[in-house]
Image (tube, rainbow, N blue to C red):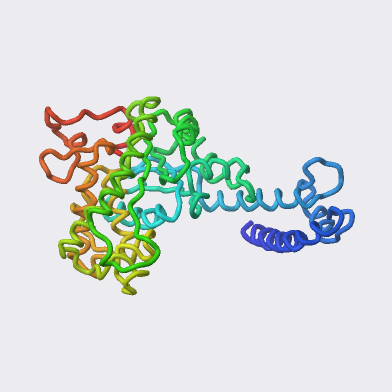
Amino acid sequence: MASMRSKRSIFLAGGLVGVLLLACVCCAGPEVTSANFARLKDYLQQHPDADIDKDGVLTLTEARRHIQKAGQQERRRKNPLSFAKGSGLRIVMTGHSWVAPAVGTLPKIAAAAGLDGHHQRPHLSGGGSGSANSIWLAEHGKYPGKMLKDILLPAIATGKWDVMTWGLYYNDWPEHYARWIDVCLQANPDMIFYIQDGWPRTPGSGSEYDFKLEDFLAGQKKINVSCKGLLTALNKKYPGKVRLIPVGDSLCELLKLYYANDLPGIEGLSKHLCGKEHTIWRDGGHIGKYMNWWEGYVYYATLYKKSPALIEAEFEVSRYNAELDKRMRQCAWKAVVNNPHTGITDKNENGIADEIEETPRKDSRSSTAGDIACGAT
């Protein structure tokens, strides 16, 4: 069986190359089909089911769709659409390059925390193509210039996912998130939703000495205002369901330490400005080396409602500079418990959210049904 799959994959790959090579021909002459091109004729003989309209002629569009469908089936074989519930969360994720760092480090952090059954199913894409609206269009085959890429929707339909996350982006409005939420809640009414906010950035050129802490804090304040409006609108429709992953506030906590000369291991604000390797940003927007662990800590703190400082494990960043790692973990938790849109408080400052304490304080917030169902998301 494995040999047959391998041969089929090889043939599909060869067919794909041939089909792509035909693109230029299609633009210059008559439509290429199995009636006038041997490659498509051979493909039709090997895969008669590729002829969608059953007219006996395979078009370039039909061949593309067949190859894409086969590729999706192979990916689903390797990446199951659902998982049994464990102590960890099952998370479907969308986002762009500002989300990707956490997607890579969060599984390692969750594993180090002793959580089994932590699963992620991401659908990421760079820039605007990674927005909530763009990923929705891509999942339906409606994103301009791209073929269907349904990674999340078939998984969501199983009802065996606990959380969905997005990365905030320009021109994503409440209705763009609501489409996702409606589909998720239809499959699993206990799902909880999180939006990762953004952070301030530096200009493309200039000197690091031109930038003041107050400028970054002012920039984050504007982002927070936008997030508040978005979350207020969504929670009005879905009470208590939509929360924030406050990476922006957490980054500002790191910046406060940097300007106070208390962020060991960080050599500058941005690599593109100072030319140094270990910086907060690498290009003024995307985060720098080892900062992927910081972002993963913010995700962990928000989703699991515990301080990453409680995890007794070393990661790549802690081996580089243990004090830097310590401050990253502290800044993650500080931002999470102080932002009103995370739903998390820690009044006794023990690193565990009040609502998941074994004996909750009388003045702490009570758990929601979604929290309990998701195993304290």
> What residue occupies the far right of the structure in this picture?
35
Q: Quadrant of the N terminus?
A: bottom right
Residue 291 vs residue 169: left or right?
A: left
In this rendered view, identify the residue nearer to me: 359 or 280.
Answer: 280
Residue 255 vs residue 106: left or right?
A: left
Q: Quadrant of the C terminus?
A: top left
Quarter assignment of residue 242: top left
In the rendered image, residue 28, in percent from the top left (x then y), is placed at 82, 59
In the rendered image, residue 71, in percent from the top left (x then y), is placed at 63, 53
Residue 94 vs residue 144: left or right?
A: left
**In the image, is residue 267 above or below residue 260?**
below
Q: Is residue 353 visible?
A: yes
Rendered residue at 66%/59% (across/down): 9
Rendered residue at 19%/48% (across/down): 334
Q: Is residue 316 visible?
A: no
In the rendered image, residue 299, in percent from the top left (x then y), is placed at 31, 48
**In the image, is residue 331 above or below residue 374?**
below
In the rendered image, residue 148, in percent from the top left (x then y), is placed at 62, 46
